[in-house]
Image (cartoon, grey):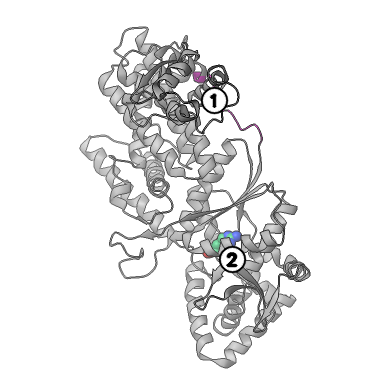
């Protein structure tokens, strides 16, 4: 299907040469969704934009445009105000379109015509350090972006750029040799909680003791030169972290391919060589750097981006440059999307700049940093436990599930309902996790957001439970009427009441919304769409009887219920959220 917006744009575009002559330069966009329902569904200010060029009053231009526009099957067209054209879709057109998508698994959303190979680099926690709420945001937002692109038909490579290399390992291994030698030879000797505490102790030791510093440096050398015992110790540390991370990914149902920083070690030398050959590298106090355009220090000198340190070691940016080259050359990526906190924006601008100046980015390749804001506690400060420690993700997710379970059990008591333990566990898990995901995704990702269990678990408002409940209402109708809504015979639509028409129009804009999200990578637009869908659906149910309606209205309304539920299910799945049949 092509959305009404696209269709109207095409029709308008095609009619214009007739009216205006072929020479006219047309401003974009020709037509946009109406800013207010009283202006219809779509509006165009083209007459105002062209009046001057044509030397005619806008209303006259509008009349000429409308005269040649044949949209009788699709919408009513009217001229308003100083020379706007308003378009109002006709119920007949809406009925036909809905009928078409009823039989389509993709609900009318066509896959893109030119699928791309796209890398989404997200989650990317660091080994031996706790995965924190920032990584949770990256995981949730990155997963949703990947799901949307996959649904559009792109080939997505979901990469976990884990921080699994660096000098911290020398320190950690040296410390473990002293304190817990068995951890370096036995699997499962430590869990990540211990590892994080040990990391802190190791750091203290490192800062206090020069002899220990020397030992740590030696271990870094051993690691880099591949000394067997050190390598093995490193691998065990990575495995332990990896297992802990996997618990979170399984819980959230997020798929990732781990390709950590260490993967790019063999390619770091070539980055330095090639930058040297290009004349971009300069020595600065013993380090090899690229001086950045547009980044200066206080005295106005260009800032250096260190590519190789004085001791020969490499930096975060060097690895990112190597990864970038690998992804373009070996993975054949046409677009690379990085999902990290906004605090890393400079890092991305900087190494993108170096790669561009080195001419490593073909014109066909697009690099995008997708930044997001901080997660804060209800006190507006950094999210912490009551005792002031950083919150473990596992605990945070468990608490969401526990609180949901308590709410649910209370609701069951009030409603005098009995349910199995299995039902309660499953429902609590889905609602709890959905609530956390949705709370994150429904915010404009660039702003900070306040993490509040009470808000996200509320059945009212722009929350996951509210959306899930709208879906459940449809399943309830299906159960009560004993009707398989996916298999209605002769699913004909008749749109008469205004809530029906409003709901129908909303269902049909899914394709427009997804196109927008794919373009701008703001999943909160999709959340807003689904929230409004649920609201419009609830209004429809309030005003239009369904099971009690007479035929053919009854079937028509059942189709609307079905399409609402399927749109919710599809939309939520693109946010990484599963639906429930009952709750
Ligand atoms: N490990 C980094 C961190 O925890 C995020 C890595 C993001 N990806 C990248 N290619 N730099 O902040």
* Residue 456 in sight from this viewpoint: yes
Give the number of the disc on residue 245. none
Label 2 environment density (alpha carbons within 10 Å; few <14, some 14–19, many ≥20): some
Chief secondary structure of the magenta portion: loop
Rendering quarter of residue 220 = bottom right
Does the magenta segment cover residue 105?
A: yes
Along the line of sight, the residue nearer the viewer: 332 or 46: 46
Q: Where is residue 420? Give x, y as percent.
A: 35, 38
Q: Where is residue 93? Give x, y as percent.
A: 45, 14
Q: Where is residue 506? Give x, y as percent.
A: 40, 27
Give the number of the disc on residue 163. 2
Does the magenta segment cover residue 50?
A: no
- Residue 501 sits above or below residue 571 on the image: above
Along the line of sight, the residue nearer the viewer: 462 or 550: 462
- Residue 201 sits above or below residue 112 on the image: below
Q: Secondary structure at mark 1?
A: loop
The reply, left or right, for residue 14 in relation to residue 384 is right
Q: Is mark 2 within 8 Å of ligand 1?
A: yes
**Highlighted range, magenta:** 101-114
Label 1 environment density (alpha carbons within 10 Å; few <14, some 14–19, many ≥20): few
**Sequence-first disc among 2 and 1:** 1
Q: Secondary structure at mark 2?
A: loop
Q: Quadrant of the N terminus?
A: top right
The reply, left or right, for residue 312 in relation to residue 68 is right
Give the number of the disc on residue 105. 1
Residue at the outermost left position: 414
Q: Give the Cα separation between the discs numbered 2 and 1.
A: 40 Å
């Amino acid at each position: 299907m092509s959305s009404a917006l696209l269709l109207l744009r095409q029709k308008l575009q095609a009619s214009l040469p007739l009216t205006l002559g072929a020479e006219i330069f047309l401003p974009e966009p020709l037509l946009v969704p109406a800013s207010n329902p009283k202006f219809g569904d779509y509006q165009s200010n083209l007459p105002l934009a062209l009046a001057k060029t044509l030397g005619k009053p806008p209303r006259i231009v509008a009349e000429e445009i409308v005269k040649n526009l044949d949209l009788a099957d699709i919408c009513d067209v009217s001229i308003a105000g100083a020379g706007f054209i308003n378009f109002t879709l006709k119920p007949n057109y809406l009925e036909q379109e809905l009928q078409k998508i009823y039989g389509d698994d993709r609900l009318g959303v066509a896959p893109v015509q030119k699928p791309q190979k796209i890398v989404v680099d997200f989650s990317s926690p660091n080994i031996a350090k706790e995965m924190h709420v920032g990584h949770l945001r990256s995981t949730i937002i990155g997963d949703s972006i990947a799901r949307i692109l996959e649904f559009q038909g792109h080939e997505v490579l979901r990469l976990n750029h884990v921080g699994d290399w660096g000098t911290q390992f020398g320190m950690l291994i040296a410390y473990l040799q002293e304190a817990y030698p068995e951890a370096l030879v036995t699997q499962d000797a430590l869990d990540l909680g211990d590892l994080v505490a040990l990391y802190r102790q190791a750091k203290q030791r490192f800062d206090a003791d020069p002899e220990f510093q020397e030992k740590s440096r030696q271990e870094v050398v051993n690691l880099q030169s591949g000394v067997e015992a050190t390598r093995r110790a490193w691998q065990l540390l990575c495995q332990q972290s990896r297992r802990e991370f996997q618990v979170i990914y399984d819980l959230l149902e997020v798929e990732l391919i781990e390709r950590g920083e260490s993967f790019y070690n063999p390619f770091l030398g070539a980055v330095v060589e090639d930058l040297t050959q290009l004349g971009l590298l300069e020595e600065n106090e013993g380090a090899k750097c690229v001086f950045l355009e547009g980044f200066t220090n206080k005295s106005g000198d260009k800032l250096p981006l260190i590519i190789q340190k004085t001791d020969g070691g490499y930096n975060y940016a060097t690895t990112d440059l190597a990864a970038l080259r690998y992804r373009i050359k070996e993975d054949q990526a046409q677009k690379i999307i990085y999902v990290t906190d906004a605090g890393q924006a400079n890092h991305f601008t900087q190494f993108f700049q170096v790669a561009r100046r080195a001419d490593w980015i073909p014109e066909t390749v697009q690099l995008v940093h997708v930044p997001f804001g901080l997660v804060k506690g209800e006190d507006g400060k950094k999210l912490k436990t009551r005792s002031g420690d950083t919150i473990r993700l596992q605990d945070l997710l468990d608490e969401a599930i526990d609180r949901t379970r308590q709410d649910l059990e209370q609701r069951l008591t009030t409603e005098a309902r009995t349910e199995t333990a299995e039902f309660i566990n499953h429902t609590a898990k889905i609602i709890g996790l959905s609530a956390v995901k949705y709370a994150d995704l429904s915010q404009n990702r660039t702003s900070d957001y306040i993490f509040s269990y009470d808000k996200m678990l509320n059945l009212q408002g722009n929350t996951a439970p509210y959306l899930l409940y709208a879906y459940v209402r449809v399943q309830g109708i299906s159960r009560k009427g004993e009707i398989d809504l996916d298999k209605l015979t002769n699913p004909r639509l008749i749109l008469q009441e205004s809530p029906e028409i409003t709901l129908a129009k909303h269902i049909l804009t899914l394709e427009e919304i997804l196109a927008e999200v794919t373009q701008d990578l703001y999943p909160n637009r999709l959340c807003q769409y689904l929230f409004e869908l649920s609201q419009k659906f609830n209004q429809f149910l309030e005003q239009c009887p369904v099971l009690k309606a007479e035929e053919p209205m009854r079937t028509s309304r059942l189709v609307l219920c079905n399409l609402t539920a399927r749109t919710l299910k599809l939309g939520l799945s693109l946010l990484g959220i599963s639906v429930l049949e009952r709750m």
